[in-house]
Amino acid sequence: MKRFQITLLILIIFTAFILRFYKLGINPPGLYWDEAVFGYDAYSILKTGKDHHGVTLPLFFESFGDWKLPGYHYLLVLSIAVFGLNEFAVRFPSAFFGSLTIIVFFFIVKKLTKNIRLSLFCTFFLAISPWHIQFSRAGFESTVGLFFVTSAVYFFLFLIDDRKTKPRSAFFLPAIALATAGLFTLSMYFYHAYRIFTPLFVISLLLIYLEVVKKIAAKLILPALLALILIFPIIIFTISKEGRSRAISQSAFSYAGFETNRIDYDQKSKKPLRFLSKYWYWPFYFSYLAFNTYIDHFSPSFLFFKGDQIGRHSQVDMGQIYLFEGILLIVSIIAFKKLNAQTKKIMFSWLILAPIPAIIVTPSPHAYRTLQIAIPLAFFSGFGAYLIFSQKKLLLVKIIMIVIIGYSFLTYLHLLLIHYPKKFAADWQDGYKAMVAQVQKYQDQFNKVYVTNINQVPYIYLLFYQKYDPQKFINSGGTRDAFDKYVFISDDVNIYDKALPAGWQGRILYVAPSWKKVDGNFLAAVDDSVGRHIYTLWEVNGQN
Amino acid sequence: MDKIKILFIIVLFSLFSFRGWQTTGCKKFLSFYFNPLSIKVSVETNVNTDLGVDRNISRLFHNKVTVGIFELSKSFASTFQPRFLGEFLGPVGLILVVTAFLEVFKKRKYLAKFHFILILIASFIAIFTLSSKASFFLLVISWYSFSLWGIDLFLKTKLAKIVFILLVIMSFWYFIFGWQMNSICNEIFFN
């Protein structure tokens, strides 16, 4: 590598780190409940060796309505030990491994194409990818999972590529093969989508390099066995009730839905064809739904204009990737043949396999479950840009492209730093930190604190932001409904009628929803970072 | 012309006609019409979000020129939504269209290139046409005819021919299941 290229690579990596770490603790604003429970469970492991439900070093963590894979929790233990229990610490592993993915991606492209300029272009597009940045800037497990997949791919290519070119010790190949198997398996311990994507992608890699794999098959037996042993708990988890809970709750394939549609067809469709309802078979119908969901992930609207409509998953005002990348992708399709066979096959299979984990669940298209597609998209964008900028002519086109890329990137930064915190504070449950701060201010004067229970989550914020002693929480049998002096009540409960025990004379702090009129002394209003009124603190019963 | 090729074209024509016939219950086709007002709305909404930001900076990112390009491209791209294309082409049609698209970039395929340009023109007409029904049929005809460029892929081997037949059957089922055509039709009703 030339000195100039090394400098450029360092600059790209530096940019990637800045984009992922700048104002990490405050943008996105607030802390989503999944992040809060990740953080507190890790804090609990750090302090007690148990999660906040009292389970010792769990292999799978109970969350809100589903079970989480353990990878991110255990990474967080380290992060929280270093940075303390706060938003930055919860997001640190995601931002850190997200940034490292950029470096690994450079080496993957370099290994595949042996072209440093192309590798730099591809790395640049992943570094500034809105899709990848979005998920690197919050406590999303998928970002770390993707790091392990890309690292495993690099080791796999290393295994294939350097096998015959360089003399190595007898242990070298098995060691690399073990690392590859270990990293692929590890990705499956981070996010549910990788339980589907990783095995499919590994199969496609083995098929692509079948000839080489056959030659080194003997050396792959041990790593394959190791992978199988490591995967075993995941398989058990996948078929367990807990493992299926998420897929069941968000499944796109419900038998009731199938029946409703079949009857609808029988009664309302075009008359001469209604008899065909007898031949509606659910595998066909579910394949129909899966096909539609799959192709949605290649929709221009999703990719270039609107993105995922869940505010936590995209900027919403722009696509998952930049609009100009549409041009680069078309250029790369035109010149697809110029790539070597292996690169073509790997990137193409990565691209077409990536949306598969998202086809069995709703909503669709889903940016988080398909984060792994950011890699081939960055590759093809980089390839398109490389082709344009490698032309000796086309000076005007190059200048126009630089202006467009620069302007699009600045617009994205404007949306990310100015618009996003204002528009999507509610999506990140912003306001709970302020609520806990107000409760802490007043709670010593009260015997009980009643908090309106919205989505069963306020308890986790009281634990998180107060750094509540996990051992105390576990020993006292704390739950989502009550712990210590805190009681969580539904918003339709009349605090005087139901929540208070008969004849009770203590002083009560009531954290009521903003819209609720309470017969008590007003203490404070709780607003989120954009001034949206969330809660009001009232003193009820025993007031002075 | 190869007899098999003629047969395949007839099969495709029948399949696409079947889909066309299914749309007869469509009371209101989905519109692709580009409303220029969307530019103004977008600019004003975004500028309002920029409270406290220097007005020049705000206008740099939210102005009628760049937002206009973005909104126009958005409307134009909506005619290429895979779900929309899939609903009238079916899986077999989609595969044919992708294959046909690759033909466009082959050397000396001037007619295919010209045909693809016609699709782009049809899409432009569709976003400036008030009649959603006319837009739909304009797009459908251009895409159906374009898909024929990909048919050679299925003539190469015996296996490819079998795959084609399977894909046609699959597409037929796809059309049956998708009788409401949500990305084509706003309202569908059969007596």
Image: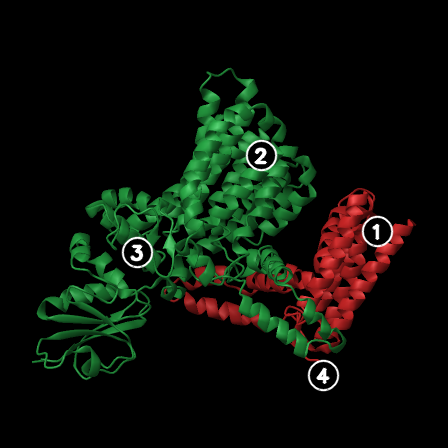
Chain colours: A green, B red
Write down the chain letter for disc 4: B
Q: Residue at x 9, y 70 (%)?
A: A445
Question: Residue A407 location, x and y as percent?
Answer: 52, 52
Q: What element carries label 4?
A: loop
Q: Is residue A394 left or right of residue A363?
A: right
- Between B180 and A6, the one nearer to me in the picture: B180
* Residue B29 spot, x, y in % from top left: 68, 74
Do the numbered discs 1 and 4 sit on residues whose CB atoms are within 8 Å?
Answer: no
Viewer-side residue, A421 vs A216 = A216
**Quadrant placement of the C terminus of chain A:** bottom left
Asked if marks 2 and 4 touch (Cβ < 8 Å), the reply is: no
Q: Which one is in front in this view, the residue at disc 3 or the one at disc 1?
A: 3
Q: Which amino acid does label 2 sit on?
A: Leu
Q: Which mark is residue A37?
A: 3
Q: What element carries label 1?
A: helix
- Label ID, residue A9: none
Residue on which disc 4 sits: B191
Cα separation, mark 3 vs mark 4, equals: 54 Å
Q: Do labels 2 and 1 share a chain?
A: no
Query: Callout 1 environment at 10 Å: few (<14), some (14 to 19), or many (20+)?
Result: few
The chain to which mark 3 is attached is A
Please state which of residues A140 and B22 is positioned toward the viewer in this rendering: B22
Q: Which amino acid does label 1 sit on?
A: Leu
Structural distance between the alpha carbons of marks 2 and 1: 40 Å
Q: Nearer the viewer, mark 3 or mark 4?
A: 4
> What's the mark number on residue B111?
1
- Discs 3 and 1 lie in a common subunit: no
The amino acid marked with disc number 4 is Asn
Residue A468 horizontal side relative to residue A369, left or right: left
Frontmost of labels 3 and 2 is 2
